[in-house]
Amino acid sequence: MSEQNNIPKHWQVKKLGEVCQTTSGGTPSRGNKNYYEGTIPWVKSGELDRGLILDTEEKISEEAVKNSSAKVFPKGTLLIALYGATIGKLAFLGVDAATNQAVCGIYKNENIDSNYLYYYLFSKKPSLVKQGIGGAQPNISQGILKNLDIPIPPLPEQLTIVSKIEELLSDLENGKQQLLTAQQQLKAYRQSLLKAAFEGKLTSTTLSEQKEGESQNSWKQVKMSELVEKPQYGTSKKCDYSYNGVGVLRIPNIANGVVNCTDLKFAEFDSNEIENYRLKEGDILTIRSNGSVDLVGKCALIQKKDEKFLYAGYLIKLRPKINQVLPKYLLNVLSSSNLRNQIENKAKSTSGVNNINSEELKSLIIPLCSIQEQHQIVEILESKLTVCDKIVETIGQSLLQAETLKQSILKKAFEGKLIWN
């Protein structure tokens, strides 16, 4: 091994531009409708997540290719995204196709195996993303790609390395899929438990166990407005990470169902503002607006330690009337599939931003039982879901470790350690 390059001595290191021909695509004028009524597949960077591209959302005409910088790449060309959130995404063309300017095509050649190059570029994606320049639309240039150092073993070794990578990544992917399956099963178990809880099945009693004068069915359906004080929106004051003033909770702080204080923003507030946006133990914060409808209506329960914080304008504070509903009981109800369906139906939007307002929250239908039974339900759920949550946390850690192991496999592969050790 060469200590300088950390690769076998018989390998070479060359710039990508020395080994491969590359070029980007183009976008025909949208002003000419005929350009987009052809049969030539036209790939956009957002489509580089399919592994092998066999079809595209849009097609262009031969006239469009002649009158723009778009060009047709042959089947087998390796594509890489240059712009925005897709930087570094890769795919092969399974058909002849053109691309827009946000995609660079790397032509096949006899000096380097395309799959070897694919896995190498995949391993360099974090580095390429860091090199992305620009503000709202970061990008990498062909110049950055062409200047990328590529470790190049003899072609037979390239094929052996690719085979070993695919073997190991296949095993890793199988393990990952098993973890994801277990994750979904736990999610289904959680919902089935919540469903049973709020149908009275976790605490149902026989007639002989009931006290004299006690109703056989104490459950009823009530509107949220009967169970909480007037919902309140948070502050719209601009906050930042300056660590001056009062900490303000935002969507990232409550998205996982518990208050997380590691990503706070701060602002200066006068005493009236502090009093207006003050939190107290037992309050529930809910997300009222988000691009993802899955996040709208997600809640977190305020603990004693969280009372020092205020909350942002895209959150709504619900303060339960504790003589009617326990905060933990209401929190669990709002996490159940029945309430999630109610929330998502009210929140869905075609504008790209999903929103639920205070009146819609107040109109939600809540299954309600006696305070005594609420205590029992909360106790049972905490007992069972604590175990469930610990398993989910372990699975999450294992999935992160799988990603780390993937990068470790690729690093060893391109240092010659995967087949030589």
Image (cartoon, rainbow, N blue to C red):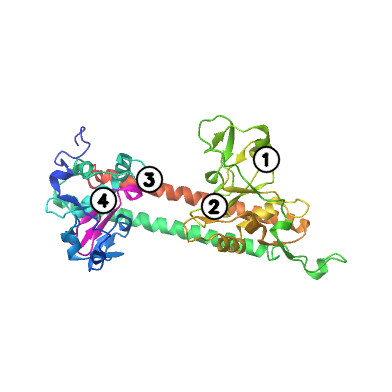
**Mark 1: amino acid:** Asn
- Disc 2 versus disc 3: nearer the observer: 2
Q: CA distance from mark 2 to mark 4?
A: 39 Å
Report the residue marked by disc 2.
289
Circle 3 packing at 10 Å, graded few (<14), some (14-19), many (20+), is few
Q: Is residue 5 magenta?
A: no
Mark 3 in CB contact with mark 4 (< 8 angstroms):
no
**Residue at the image position 20 percent from the left and 39 percent from the top:** 7
Mark 3 vs 1, N-terminal side? 1
Report the residue marked by disc 3.
404
Q: Residue furthest front?
A: 31
Mark 2 vs 3, N-terminal side? 2
Mark 2 in CB contact with mark 4 (< 8 angstroms):
no
Judged left or right of residue 317, residue 185 is: left
**Mark 3: amino acid:** Thr
Judged left or right of residue 191, residue 106 is: left
Q: CA distance from mark 2 to mark 3?
A: 33 Å
Mark 3 in CB contact with mark 1 (< 8 angstroms):
no
Q: Pick the quarter of the image with the N terminus.
A: top left
Residue 186 rendering spot, x and y as whole percentages = 54, 59
**Residue at the image position 71 percent from the left and 57 percent from the top:** 225
**Mark 4: amino acid:** Tyr
Give, as a single range, the part of the protein colored magenta: 74-103
